[in-house]
Image: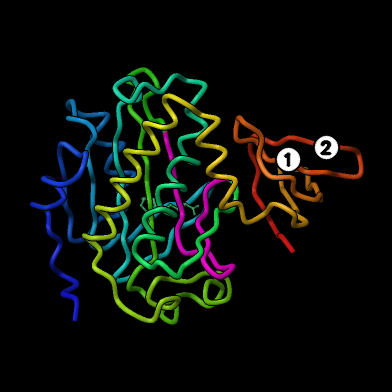
């Protein structure tokens, strides 16, 4: 039986690339706290903000991020200069992060086949199990917040009804509890690797991302501002843009919300 309350902060500090950790039993949002830290005195990056339980998690746009006891919710503050990430690579950080989560999940559950739904959702068995929120609160300071939420030991049977049909967790998919410190260490290890890959070879990173693409070959309905576009997904281009074959030809999107896919 895994002791849910036992975060191994010593191991996290010793065995990961983070140089500082702030741990909270309960916190509104780890991204909000990371942004607060950046606005205040200087932080020694990479810096981890970890919450055992998040009460006001944020998703993309105005979405909320549901989590319950047993979820893994954290943010990492990185210094883009120290990571060698030129501004044109920043839009690919969320792709690099999704890749890191997939790599960590495959190591944790070798039978699992995680997929990436553009731009930054991680799916298992066609259901969302992890969401990523990358924010750059102070482009001037060069600090970026990488927020990651993974449904681990929080069964979706406890979630609001609309989520029970579309989301999943590791315990629901794999049928057993997992040690969150262990999984976090793996995500951090792969995040370090994929950010390094992004710094030196963005194309290679995108090539790896494509091998996990959930939408490629599927019909996608994309909302971009007030426009809705229906098209067959041809994956992502080297800059991470979504390619849709539409009735008016091939179109590329650098942002948008996937409303539906068949
Ligand atoms: C999404 O799916 O739209 C993104 C969800 C991101 C959730 C994570 S949980 C940790 C971090 N703190 C937040 O408030 N959000 C991110």
Magenta region includes residue 203: no
Q: Residues within 10 Å of mark 2 (few under 14, many from 20)?
A: few
Q: Residue at x 13, y 45 (%)?
A: 13
Q: Check disc 1 and report the residue beneath it.
A: 243
Look at the image and give the residue range highlighted in magenta. 119-135
Q: Position of residue 168 (x, y in %)?
A: 48, 71
Ligand 1 closer than 8 Å to the CB at disc 2? no
Q: CA distance from mark 2 to mark 1?
A: 7 Å
Please, what is the dominant secondary structure of the magenta stretch? strand
Closest to the observer, 248 or 57: 248
Relative image position of residue 167 (x, y in whole percent) = 52, 69
Secondary element at image label 2: strand
Instruction: Sort mark 1 into few (<14), some (14-19) or many (20+) by Cα contacts within 10 Å.
Output: some
Q: Is residue 177 above or below residue 262?
A: below
Residue 68 to residue 222: above or below: below
Quick one: quadrant of the C terminus? bottom right
Tell me the element at label 1. strand
Question: Residue 201: percent from the left, percent from the top?
Answer: 48, 27
Question: Residue 140, which numbered label?
Answer: none
For residue 218, what is the image quadrant?
bottom right
* Image disc number at residue 250: 2
Q: Residue at x 64, y 34 (%)?
A: 254
């Amino acid at each position: 039986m895994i002791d849910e309350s036992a975060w191994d902060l010593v191991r996290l500090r010793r065995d990961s690339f983070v140089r500082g950790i702030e741990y909270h039993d309960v916190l509104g949002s780890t991204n909000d706290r990371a942004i607060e830290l950046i606005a205040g005195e200087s932080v020694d990056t990479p810096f981890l903000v970890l919450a055992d339980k998040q009460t006001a998690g944020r998703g993309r746009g105005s979405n909320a991020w549901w989590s319950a006891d047993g979820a893994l919710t954290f943010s990492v503050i990185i210094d883009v200069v120290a990571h060698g990430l030129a501004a044109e690579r920043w839009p690919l950080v969320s792709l690099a992060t999704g890749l890191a989560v997939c790599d960590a999940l495959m190591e944790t559950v070798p039978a699992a086949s995680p997929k990436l739904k553009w731009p930054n959702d991680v799916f298992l068995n066609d259901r969302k199990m992890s969401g990523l929120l990358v924010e750059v609160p102070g482009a001037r300071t060069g600090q970026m917040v990488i927020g990651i939420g993974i449904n681990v030991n929080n069964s979706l049977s406890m979630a609001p009804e609309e989520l029970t049909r579309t989301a999943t967790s590791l315990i629901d998919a794999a049928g057993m509890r997992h040690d969150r410190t262990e999984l976090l260490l793996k995500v951090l290890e792969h995040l370090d690797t994929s950010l390094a890959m992004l710094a030196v070879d963005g194309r290679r990173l995108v090539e790896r991302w494509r091998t996990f693409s959930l939408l490629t070959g599927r019909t996608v309905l994309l909302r971009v501002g007030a426009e809705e576009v229906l098209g067959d997904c041809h994956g992502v281009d080297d800059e991470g843009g979504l390619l849709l074959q539409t009735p008016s030809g091939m179109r590329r999107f650098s942002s948008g919300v996937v409303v539906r896919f068949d």
